[in-house]
Image (cartoon, rainbow, N blue to C red):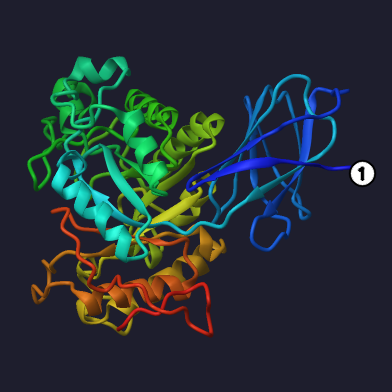
Amino acid sequence: MRKTTLYFVLYVGLISAIFLAAPAAAADYVSGRVIDFSTRKPIKEAIVTGNNEIVRTDMNGLFTIKNASGKIGIRAYGYARGEITFTAPRPRSPLDVYLKPFVPRALYLTYYGIGDRHLRNSALDLMKETDINALVIDVKGDRGILTYKSNVPRVEEVGAQKQVIIKDVHGLINSMRERGVYTIARIVVFKDNVLGAARPDLAVKTQDGKTFYDREHLIWVDPSRKEVWDYNISLAVEAAQYGFDEIQFDYVRFPDKKGLQFSVPNTEENRVKNISGFLSEASRALAPYNVFVAADVFGYASWNLDDTQIGQRLDAITPHVDYISLMLYPSGFQFGIPGYRNPVAHPYEIVSLSLKKARERTAIASVRFRPWLQAFRDYAFDRRHFQAHEISSQIRAAEEFGSNGWMLWNPRNVYTSEGLKREPLSKNNKKQANPTS
């Protein structure tokens, strides 16, 4: 069978494949093969989207998708996403589409960090001397405030648009793409002080029916309320439309305090059902935009057999997202893990063993994980600063595991090259950098 080879322009985070010429189509479908750009081998289980159709490639990287009208999105775990555009009539010959392997290594910038030119430029400058190639950007932060002007009606209604930090979202995304930066939109879901204050009926309640405030004196909204789901999904779709490469849902959980009231009984079954239900619905809504979807998950979810009392159970989450972002900050493991009671003294072991346990529990590939790593001062044990040794040890653990990169968290937006210096590739694992530890 004759194949049509595509010419394409390559961007980090997006491969745009533009069809040049093809015979007239005889049927209302497009077929093709998805291929690894580096190895020229077929990619199985790649996700192909067109209109509202979603299919996966077979063992030979082949797909056939119906009702494709001018554009097809393609993405696969561990690769930059791709897109084919063509004009009518549809191509009749199968298409060869190449995806380039891509491993995000990200810094997190808060609501203020992305808006402050000095902090933003410091992060971008760090990319010139290290392997950092991605940014996690607050779209909706911990207090429920949006960073850019949103067209979602409820944003204005509840007062979530107090200050526009990002004046030109399209310009920001295009600038990042030109620099080869993979962009991740962080959306804090159920911790939402703004929505909860404006709509007390949606807020989590204490046993006496009053609005619940957490340790930061912030309101949470009820994870079992469909209105809350719809609001956050609308924001995620808008971010995808702006061109972010990935949507990352944070605080996609129930609050960890006992004795709270929700619109459903506070049982493990209901908690898990609502968290997985939200992620399932969000993923369906985002599917037409060919964007990766990730969920931030509590580190102990790797080890605990239950939902950790917050609705996060790995087996219930993994079917609905592309990437699992375990928060593996050693300071967050207040009880340690088996064999390591002082986690901040063993950053490599915390990350390595937690990832392995999560893979064992879920039976999914290592490339489906991208952990959060600690780049801030310890707050729970000896108050040590996480510097070159601690940071590089965590990175080494993630890379040896084979995760799809990693993300560094520092809520002050302060990062240095310590532990991030480029090193020669290991002879034993050319995919892995060899940081000092």
Q: Residue furthest right?
A: 1
Residue 24 in the image, given as x and y percentages of width and height = 85, 23
The C terminus lies in quadrant: bottom left
Q: Nearer the viewer, residue 420 or 60?
A: 420
- Left or right: where 433 falls relative to 362: left
Q: Nearer the viewer, residue 145 or 207?
A: 145
Q: Amino acid at mark 1?
A: Met
Residue 264 visible in rendering: no
Residue for point 68% across, 63% down: 39
Residue 375 in the image, given as x and y percentages of width and height = 21, 65
Task: Determine the image quadrant of residue 352.
Answer: bottom left
The N terminus lies in quadrant: top right
Residue 42 in the image, given as x and y percentages of width and height = 73, 56
Judge whether 126 appears above or below 14 on screen.
below
- Left or right: where 13 falls relative to 204: right
- Badge 1, how many Cα within 10 Å: few under 14, some, many 20+? few
Residue 191 in the image, given as x and y percentages of width and height = 22, 39
Residue 143 visible in rendering: yes
Q: Nearer the viewer, residue 232 or 373?
A: 373
Residue that numbered label 1 is attached to: 1
Residue for point 65% across, 56% down: 37
Judge whether 13 appears above or below 420 on screen.
above
- Left or right: where 238 falls relative to 284: left
